[in-house]
Amino acid sequence: MSDLSELVARLHEQLRATEELPVDRTAGRWIGEAQAVAADVAEGDPPESVVADRVGHVRRLLAEVDDAGDEAATEHVERASELAEEILDRVEE
């Protein structure tokens, strides 16, 4: 597994970790869509341009979440946002 694909997998896992938590309904919609996009990128080995586009979309979706309504979920979202930034930094190098 390449370093980039490992980061993408970790991004998806952070978002997936919110599934069983009591997330605010509105935040849950943003997180759920971000998770679906991250899952799409985590499957297979897409070109870096696709990774950049899709992870950029994840970042925009997560930017809509101020508070997930649960402390643990908010921490997962924050970590996912950090991972998205790290991934985008890598593909832009």
Image (spheres, helix red, strand yellow):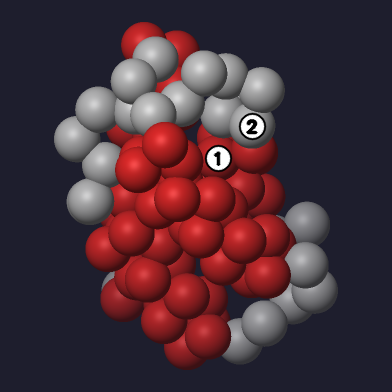
Q: Considering depth in this image, is 90 or 68 the residue closer to the camera? A: 68
Give x and y (percent) for residue 61.
Answer: 33, 59
The residue that label 1 is drawn on is 15
Give x and y (percent) for residue 82.
Answer: 33, 41
Q: Amino acid at mark 2?
A: Glu
Q: Residue furthest front?
A: 25
Give x and y (percent) for residue 21.
Answer: 57, 19
Q: Is residue 28 above or below residue 68?
A: below
- Name the residue rendered at 47%, 88% in the picture: 49
Count of picture labels: 2
Instruction: Give the distance between the C-alpha atoms of the residues marked 1 and 2, in whole angstroms.
Output: 8 Å
- Name the residue rendered at 23%, 51% in the picture: 64
Q: Considering depth in this image, is 19 or 9 the residue closer to the camera? A: 19
Can you tell which of label 1 and label 2 is closer to the viewer? 2
Give x and y (percent) for residue 50.
Answer: 53, 85
Q: Residues within 10 Å of mark 2 (few under 14, many from 20)?
A: some
Task: Name the image quarter holding residue 69.
Answer: top left
- Name the residue rendered at 78%, 57% in the picture: 1
Q: Is residue 64 above or below residue 52?
A: above
Q: Residue furthest top?
A: 71
Q: Which element carries disc 1, helix, strand or loop?
A: helix
The residue that label 2 is drawn on is 19
33 to the left or right of 12: left
Residue 22 appears in view? yes
- Name the residue rendered at 77%, 67% in the picture: 43
Q: Amino acid at mark 1?
A: Leu
Q: Which element carries disc 2, helix, strand or loop?
A: loop
Residue 83 appears in view? no
Q: Quadrant of the C terminus?
A: bottom left
Q: Is residue 63 above or below residue 78?
A: below
Q: Residues within 10 Å of mark 1 (few under 14, many from 20)?
A: many
